[in-house]
Structure formats: structure tokens, C-alpha cells
Amino acid sequence: MLWSLLKILIFVGLVAALAFGAGVLMENAPGLRIAVGEVEFVLGPLQAVILGLLVVIAVWLLLKLAGLLLATLRFLSGDETAISRYFNRSRERRGFQALADGMIALASGEPRLAMSNAAKAERLLGRPELTNLLSAQAAEMTGDTRRAIDIYKKLVVDDRTRFVGVCGLMKQKLAEGDTDTALKLAEKAFALKPRHGETQDALLQLQARNEDWKGARTTLNAKLRHGTLPRDVHKRRDAVLALAEARDLLVDGNGPRARDLAIEANRLAPTLVPAAAMAARALVEQDKPKPAAKVLKRAWEVQPHPDLAAAFAEIAPEETPEERIKRFEALTALRPDDSESRMLMAELHIAAEDFPAARKALGDLAESDPTARVLTLMAAIERGMGADDSVVRGYLARALSAPQGPQWVCESCGTVHETWAPVCSACNGFDTMSWTRAASGQAALPGASDMLPLLVGGPKEKPAG
């Protein structure tokens, strides 16, 4: 601003000087006399004007030369000029090209080339927030975790890259198996960017793995609030977490709160088998047998399961075998052709020592779906009907190598579990359990499922003779 004002003043001064010179020429006709020492020059009007113009041009040239000299001095002293800007732009272009080459090399599986380009980009650009992430990822790919961790720590210091650095450190701690530190880092990353879906998932998985059910429910609610989780999936997973918390509270002796959470879990996910079974038991303890039966029937209609049958039996534990058969007919009638309903009725008839009825209830399952449980039931039926021991042993021998039937199987890794759990013990997957048939050759641990869950004792031996 001041330099522009100064140039305007110089221009006005030159115009005024030229006007004054023109007036002097007109007053001193026929020309302008200039004396330098003993030499005297007389210039006509035209010559005087030309001389004035030459002086102006000379002054302009001197000013330009002075400006060039000043710019050169400023360039040498480090100030930004057009020359420095040209070199900076060229340097920046080469830096971004190196950064792009590094990213392409990383995507192509060439981590060492990516690290080389990242170092070159850092040298040319001087912007670590752009190059450090590339260097860290390349170091991870080469297996240099120590270098990757050091770089992520540098990213944490900068406000612009703190989230990226925290996430990188969290992944490193997960790879090392340090889940406690990883959980703290995930909580920090979530606080920085609560809308980030991947961070929400990581935090939820870690909280579930560490059995922080309350914290996991808070994270799950955040996923719903930020639109990263469908409402129906949220209800199902919220039920899983409520059920897991209820189980822990029951172990700790807090029965009332555990019952409330179990009922809440069943309300959120009525078809979740373990929630229905636990909620029914809670309702029975509150002297509400009819609501308990309703809960179990609703779940059975979707997924018949031995745990539901066991909970249904606990509604009236003192009933006789005949009374139990009659009461259970209302349950099995919901899915009469399901193999679980047929096996259940066979077990009940075995308990009542009505072996022909048990065989009728089992139908052709021994031929159409010969699972270990079906064949064991057939062995019990044959023994109760007085068949030869060789027949009984034949069914039991077949049962040893027969498929196990539906079990709790992790949908993520295929691991078979003895009982339902919110987190897979093998892959740490959350809410991955489903009641299905495992891959061939897989079975739960010994004692995973009772072959005759409702049979107390066994068929009585007929007295000899």
C-alpha cells in the first residue's frame, strides 16, 4: 500500500517537473542554455524535450535495476520471490508425484518402493501429515512394526492426524494381542470421531471381548444414532448384550436385575433362543407361568430348540410324565414335522415308558436323518421294547460316528460351541452364533448336548424270568 502511494507521488512529481520545464523553455527562447564548467550548450525546444524524455527513461531504468537488485538480495536472503516461487512449484510437483508413486507402489504390494517414494516426498514437500501415513503402512507391510509404531506416534502429536495415528496404534496393539491398550485407543478414536463406522465396530468388538456389556450397549446405541446400523440389527445385538449382562449378574448373585435384563433381551429379540429360555425362567421365578409359556412358544415356532424344551419343562417340574406329554403337545403342535419336535415327543414317551408311542413319534428319522441323538433314542426305544442287546448296541455304535445334528456354530469361523455365547471363543466374533449343522467331522466338546435332556434315569430293566 505504501509502495503504491510512493509510486503515485513520484509520478505526480515527474509530471509537475516536466510542466515546469516546459514553462521555462517557453520563457527563455530561443532555447535552453546549459553550462557545465567552461563548456556551454544551447538546446532548442525540441532538443530540450528529447533530453527530458531521456532523463525520464534513465530514471525509470535506474529504478528497475534497483528493484531487480533488491529482489536478488531478498532471494539470496531467503525471501519469497517469483524465482523462488517457480522453484517451489517445481519442487512441489515432484513431491506430489513421489507421493502418488508411493501410494501406487503400496497398492501394488511393493512396500519398499513405497517407503522410498514416501521418503522422497517428505524431503521435497516437508509435509509429514501427508507422507507419514504412507510410510507407516509401508513399514507394516514389510513387517517393521517398530517403525510403524514410531510413525503413528508422530501422527498422534498433530491435531490434523491424531485420529489416524490413534487408529494405527490400535491396530498394532490388536496385532500384538494387547487388547486392554487397544480398547483404550479405540475409546480415544471413538471420542475423536464418533461417526466413524470402522471405529465403532472395532470398539464394539473390543468391549464385547472384554465383557464390557454396558459400554458395548452405549457404543451400539451410538451406531444406531449415527445411522451406521439398521434398527432391526440394533435390536438383535442389543438383546445379545443385555442377555450377556444378565448372565454375569446372575453369576454375581444379582438375581432381580438379571431377570429384568433377561426379560428385556427377550422383548428386543423374541426369537433369540437363549434369551427366551432365560426370560421364561425369570417369569417362572416371578410366578408367571403363562407368560413364560407364551415366551417359549413364540420362540419355538421360529426355532425349535432343546433349551426351549428344558425351560418349558421347568414351568411345571412336579408333573407326572403323562401330564408332561399332554402339556408339551401344545408346544410341539406349533412345529409338528420338525425333527426337534419329533425327538422331544419321543423322549417324553420314553420317560413315560410308552416305547411304541416313542417309536411312532420318532417316525422315519432313523433312516431320513440319522443323527447321534436320533440313533441314541432308537437304542433306548429298542431296549425298552425288549430287543436283543445286539440291536441296541448296533444303534449305539452307529451313534458314535453319526452326525451331531444342529449345534451352536460360529458363522464367522465355523467353530462349534457347547453352549451359546455372545462372543466366539475362537475368532472373537460378536453375535456370530447360529443353531445349525456344523461342517462334517466337527462336534462340540464332550457333554455338549444331552442325548435325552428330559429323560430322568432310563427305562427300567424288566426282571428276569
Image: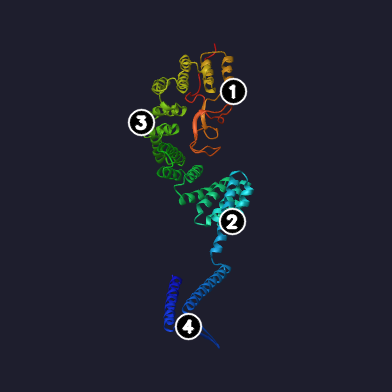
Q: Give the CA separation, mark 1 to mark 4.
A: 130 Å
Q: Which mark is residue 122?
A: 2
Identify the image quadrant of residue 30.
Answer: bottom left
Q: Secondary structure at mark 3?
A: helix
Identify the image quadrant of residue 175.
Answer: top right
Specify few, some or many for label 2: CA neighbours under 10 Å numbering under 14, 14-19, or 20 or more. Answer: many
Please tell me whether mark 1 or mark 3 is closer to you in this view: 1
Specify few, some or many for label 4: CA neighbours under 10 Å numbering under 14, 14-19, or 20 or more. Answer: some
Amino acid at pointer 1: Ser
The relative height of residue 352 versus residue 438 in the rendered view (above or below) is: above
- Residue that label 3 marks: 291
Q: Which mark is residue 32?
A: 4
Q: Secondary structure at mark 1?
A: helix
Q: Give the CA separation, mark 4 to mark 2.
A: 68 Å
Seen from the viewer's position, the closer of residues 138 and 180 is: 138
- Residue that label 1 marks: 401
Q: Earlier in the sequence, mark 1 or mark 3?
A: 3
Please tell me whether mark 3 or mark 2 is closer to you in this view: 2
Please tell me whether mark 4 or mark 2 is closer to you in this view: 4
